Image (cartoon, rainbow, N blue to C red):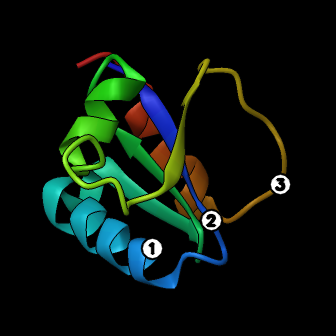
């Protein structure tokens, strides 16, 4: 299991809309978190390329985003809902 940041390019509106829709339909509510308009977190797979494949980016060259695996170490100040999601996403299943 892993937690991944999906970074959307701010100047790729059509691509972003498609990726947002795919994140929200292919990852259940407890497996994705919308942190900002162009930043989602997803959990589930082990490898970044599995996220890329799940979002259909390998099949569609017009979809552009960066997928980064997070290492499980995190800190900062944010909303309680974010920390609750991060804790749950990083618990062994």
Secondary structure, mark 3, is loop
Q: Secondary structure at mark 2?
A: loop
Q: Secondary structure at mark 1?
A: helix
How many residues crowd mark 1 within 10 Å: few (<14), some (14–19), many (20+)?
A: many
What residue is rendered at 67% in x and 65% in y? 79
Vertical relation: 38 (above or below) 53: below
Please name the residue that numbered disc 1 is placed on: 16
Image quarter in which the N terminus is found = top left
For residue 66, above or below residue 12:
above
Q: Is residue 85 left or right of residue 93?
A: right
Q: CA distance from mark 3 to mark 1?
A: 27 Å
Q: Residues within 10 Å of mark 3 (few under 14, many from 20)?
A: few
User: Is label 1 in contact with label 2 (beta carbons under 8 Å)?
Assistant: yes
Indicate left or right for 22 with 71 as reference. Answer: left
Q: Which residue is identified by label 2?
A: 9
- Residue 69 visible in image: yes
Q: Residue at x 62, y 61 (%)?
A: 80
Task: Name the spot of residue 60 as percent of width and height, x first.
Answer: 25, 55
Whether residue 44 appears in this view of the structure is no
């Amino acid at each position: 299991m892993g937690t991944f940041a999906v970074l959307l390019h701010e100047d790729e509106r059509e691509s972003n809309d498609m990726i947002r829709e795919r994140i929200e339909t292919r990852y259940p509510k407890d497996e994705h978190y919308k942190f900002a308009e162009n930043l989602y977190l997803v959990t589930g797979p082990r490898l970044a390329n599995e996220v890329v494949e799940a979002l259909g980016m390998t099949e569609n060259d017009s979809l552009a985003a960066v997928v980064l695996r997070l290492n499980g170490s995190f800190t900062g100040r944010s909303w309680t809902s974010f920390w609750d999601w991060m804790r749950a996403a990083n618990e062994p299943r």
